[in-house]
Structures are given as C-alpha cells and as structure tokens.
Amino acid sequence: MSHPSPLRPQRTLRTAAVVIGRGYWSGCENRVELRPAPVGSGIGFLRADLRPEAAVPAVVGAVVEARNRTQLVRGAASVHLVEHVMSALAGLGIDNCDVAVTAEELPGLDGSSRGFVEAIDAAGIVDQAAVSDALVVRKPVRVGDSASWIEAGPPRFPGLSIEYLLDYGPGPIGRQQLDIDVTPDSYRTHLAAARTFLSVDDAARLRAAGLGTTVSPGDLVLFGPDGPVGTTLRWQDECVRHKVLDCVGDLALAGRPLHAHVRAFRSGHALNAELVRELLACDAGLRLGRTA
C-alpha cells in the first residue's frame, strides 16, 4: 500500500513574535515570545522568569496529567495550558521554535489559538535547509475504551487529518462532528478561532476552589442550560472545532509532524498524549526492525 509523501522543508519564524495575556486558572500575566530556532531543535519552552532560566521540551515524555489542560514538566520547571500555542505552531507547520515565557501558565486569551496565529503570521514563516522528519503512521493504533477513544491510521493526504465526534448528550452542546484535513489554510479558517468551553456549573466549582477567578465570558464560552452565556458562538459546532484544535496541539507533542488520519470519540488531553506515546513506540519498533 502506498502512502502520501511526507517530505517538506522544516520551518521556523522569520522574526520573534510576542503575545501577552493572563492565565485562566492563575490569573497571572504572561509575556510569551515565540523565537526563531535552528534546524532540528523542535519546539521548546523557556521559563525566562526563573533563575537560572529553565528549559522544558515540548515532547510527550514531559507531560504530567493535569485537569482540563496539558502540562509539561522538566525538573523543577513546568508550563501548562500549552495546547493552544502548540496547536497554532503545528497548525501553521512550524517545526522549530523557542517559546520564552514569564510565568508558568500560558495565556488563555479569548479561549482560542487565534492570537498566537495572528502573531506568527505577523512575524512570518520561513523554510529551512533541512527536510522535516515526519512520523508517518503505517498501521492503525487505538487507545481508550468504549466511553472515549482516539485512534490513528495511515494518512489520506501528506499531513494530518482529524475526524472527531463530540457527544455531551442532551443539552445545549449535544452531539457534534468535524472531519478536516489540517493544513495552514484550513487551520486559520476553520479551527484557530474556536474557543474553550465550560459549563457554568464547572466554572462555579473551579471558582470555589480558587481557580479561574478572573475569567469572564469574554475569555471562553460558558454554557448554561439554555446555551452560551454572554457570548455568541462563532460556529454552531464551535465546541467540536475546539476539541480538534486541542487535538492538533496535543499530537504535536510527538516532536515531529504527524502524518495520519486520526479518529476520536470524546477524547481529551490524557488520551491524546497516550496515543502519541503509542505511535512513537510503534515507530521506534519499525525503525529498529528496519535497521536490525
């Protein structure tokens, strides 16, 4: 069976880009500087507020499970809510970038990755003198159970496609489905502006625990029994679009462009990371078999 060619140049930013905003859960302001990086360096975070500064690689091996977000830890340094900036970088095809931050939590912005995309586009994207080392899925890999799962199979085009089914049962969110080939153009148009969503009940529980006390309806989509509170949906299926946005960011923790067709049912950050681990293990086994 033939597979699409994964070959393309590695890419980085032409110049640095800056995004400033507050973290959702901490309320702390964070200055994020996306910097050009050399060939083969991948994506990495730099805690510029620590002394000495501390690097945290954006790889699945650094993932520590956290509720409602993706968290990376290396030694005493951590960064969390990284999925939106990771999604923006992966969605636009950026392979190499240093992400310097001045706080542990990445900005929530308006709940989407649009602010990061706009900053990257303003800085510019350049090809580099090396070919990207894509992770091409050769056979189906699936994790999860009947209640929630995610699987990756061989690619249907030279890149990543995602088919996601969201099902919240009866209520304003309900059942939504999206099937998309993730390219820079489709990412900008159909995914980047899709916002994080949360029920008013979950928001109340978080605030009672001292989290998210500065979050307002302008920072994400709050759903009450009758629908969005204090905002208008950007798409009727905005929730599933955001789930795909998150998935793009989590899958980027493979540390390489992923060429696969991914199908998911009610998957979240933990399952997304588990799939990446399985895909890397399978790929390592295949490479070992080829070199044995």
Image (cartoon, rainbow, N blue to C red):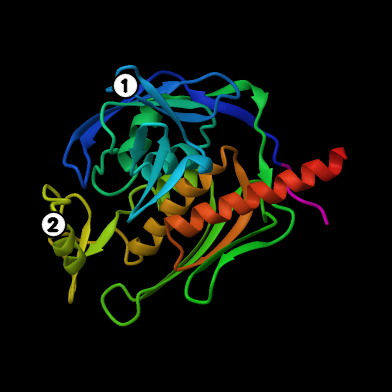
- Mark 1, residues whose alpha carbon is within 10 Å: few (<14), some, or many (≥20)? some
Residue that carries the numbered disc 1 in the rendered image: 48
Q: Residue at x 48, y 44 (%)?
A: 185
Q: Which mark is residue 207?
A: 2
Rendering coords of residue 182 (x, y %): 53, 50
Rendering coords of residue 139 (x, y %): 73, 58
Nearer the observer, 136 or 292? 292
Instruction: Report the side of 7 relative to 169 (left or right).
Output: right
Q: How many marks?
A: 2
SS of the residue under disc 1: loop
Looking at the image, residue 208 lies above or below residue 126: below
Nearer the observer, 112 or 254? 254
Q: Residue at x 23, y 46 (%)?
A: 110
The residue under label 1 is which amino acid type? Ala
Whether 2 is among the magenta residues is: yes
Instruction: Report the side of 281 relative to 160 (left or right).
Output: right
Report the span colored magenta: 1-5
Please name the predominant secondary structure of the magenta segment in the image: loop
Q: Residue at x 16, y 51 (%)?
A: 212
